[in-house]
Amino acid sequence: MRYISTRGQAPVLSFEEAMLTGLARDGGLYMPESWPHMSAGEIADLAGAPYEEVAYRVMRPFIGEAFTDTEFRGAIARAYAGFRSTARVPLVQYEAGKFLLELHHGPTLAFKDVAMQLIGQLFDLALTRAGKRVTIVGATSGDTGSAAIEAFRGLSSVDVFILYPHGRVSEVQRRQMTTPVESNVHAIAVEGDFDDCQARVKDMFNDFAFRDTVGLAAVNSINWARVLAQTVYFFTSAVALGAPHRAVSFAVPTGNFGDIFAGYAAKRMGLPVERLIVATNLNDILHRTLETGEYRMEGVHPSISPSMDIQISSNFERLLFDLYDREGAAVALAMDELRARGGFTLPQGALNRLRAEFDSARASEEETSATIAAMFASNGQVICPHTAVGVHAADEVHGTRRIPVVTLATAHAAKFPDAVEAACGQRPALPPHMADLYERPERVQVVANDLETIETLIKDTRT
C-alpha cells in the first residue's frame, strides 16, 4: 500500500513514512493510493469478534510491510488494554432504531483516544527500531491534545507540543493537557481560535528548515493513521446491527471532518453505509457547503460544544480529492482560493457526488441544550454537548426511516459539566481515575499567535 498527497506534488510514501511525516511537503494530506475492499463474507465474519481482532482485520491492508503481524497485533492489544469497557466502544440503544456508539471509554474520555492510543504504540515501535526521536506538534480544539499527551507522555522517542486556543476549551479539557508531569509533553495556549492554532501547525510544516531541524511530526487528524484507526468502530457498530446484510446510517458530530471521513473510508472499503450525516453546531461551514455548494469561512463563534468550533475543516481536503477525481492540481487550486479569498465554490459534479454520500444538519445552542435535556428526561442518558449535536442531526435528517442510525457519542459528559448541568440539571462526575483532576498543578505557557514565537519556544523547550 502506497500513499499519495491530495495536492499531487509530494513523494509517494509507505504507511510508516506517511504516519511519521503527517503533512505532505506540498501542503497536502496523505491518502491511500487505492481503497482496499472487504467482501460481504469478510465483513460478516467480523460478527462477535473482539474489538482488537476487528481492528487488525480492517487496518491490516493499509499497513503494508511497516509492521509484522506480531508487532501490529501487540500494538493494538496495548492500545486498548486500558479502556474501561470490555467492548471498547459499546453500542447503546436509546430509541427504536436509534443508537449511541460510546467512544469515550479511553483514558481521556473522548473518541480521540481510540486512534491516539494506537498511534502512540505505532510511533514508539517505528522510532525505537530506527533509533530516531521526533517532535510532535498538534493543534487541538480540546480533545485531540489531551489524547495525544496521554498517548505519548513519558515515551523516550518523542517530544509533544500541543497548541490550543487560550480560553476556548473546557476546564476539564485544559487540565487534561496542563497537569501531566512528564517532561516530554507540553501545552501551549495560543491567543486566538482553533483555526489559528491549526494554521500555525501547518506553517511549521511548511517551514522546511524548522521542520527538518526538530524532526517535525503530526498526530492530529492530518495524519492518515488517525483516520484509519477511526474506521474500525464504524465496522464494529454496523456489524452489530446486521451488516453486511443490513445498511446502517451514521450521525457524526464533526468540525474538522476527520471522524466522518473515517466513515466514508469504511464505506469505500465495502461497509454498507446508507447515509453519513454531518452534524455541526453554529460553526456550520460544512452544513452550508452541503446546502449551497459554497465552502466559505464566516468566523469562529465560541459555543458549548467547543471541540467543533472550527471553520477550516482540514480533512475535507481528503474528500475533495475523491470528489475531484483525485486531481491534485484541482485540490491545490481550491486550497489556494480558500487561503486567498476565504472560500471556494464546488463544481456541480463534485457537489452532486457530495450530496449523494452525505446529509447534514445544524444545531443551535438552544437546540443542543434542549437535546441534552430531552435525552435525560426520556431515557436517563446524560450526554455531552457534541453528542447532543449528533443526536439532533439524526432526528432532523433521519427521522423515522427504517434503517438504523448510529450517533457517535464522542465525549464523556463530565468533560463539559457546566453546559450539561445547565441543560438537564445533572452535573456529571469525573470517573475515579480522574477524580483529583481539579487539584493537580497546571503547567502551561500562553503565547501570541505568532509563528516565530511558537517555533522558538519549541526549539528551546525540547528535551
Image (spheres, rainbow, N blue to C red):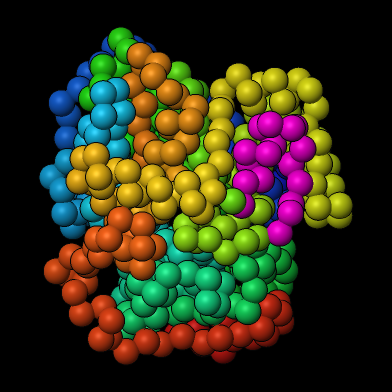
Task: Relative to 320, say whether 158 is above or below.
Answer: below
Q: In which quarter of the image is the C terminus?
A: bottom left
Looking at this view, is 420 or 407 the one in front? Answer: 420
Looking at this view, is 237 or 17 the one in front? Answer: 237
In the image: residue 116, left or right of residue 397? left
Looking at this view, is 40 or 372 the one in front? Answer: 372
Q: Give the range drawn in magenta.
A: 283-299
Q: Where is residue 419 in the image (x, y as percent from the top left)?
A: 39, 63
Task: Relative to 304, say whether 328 is above or below.
Answer: above
Q: Where is residue 326 in the image (x, y as percent from the top left)?
A: 70, 29
Asked if residue 38 shows in the view, the reply is no
Task: Relative to 435, say whether 377 is above or below.
Answer: above
Instruction: Kindly indicate the quadrant of the structure image that contains residue 269.
Output: top left
Q: Where is residue 462 in the image (x, y as percent from the top left)?
A: 50, 83
In the image, what residue occupies the spot 68% across and 31% down? 291
Asked if residue 172 shows in the view, the reply is yes
In the image, what residue occupies the spot 26% across and 47% down? 376
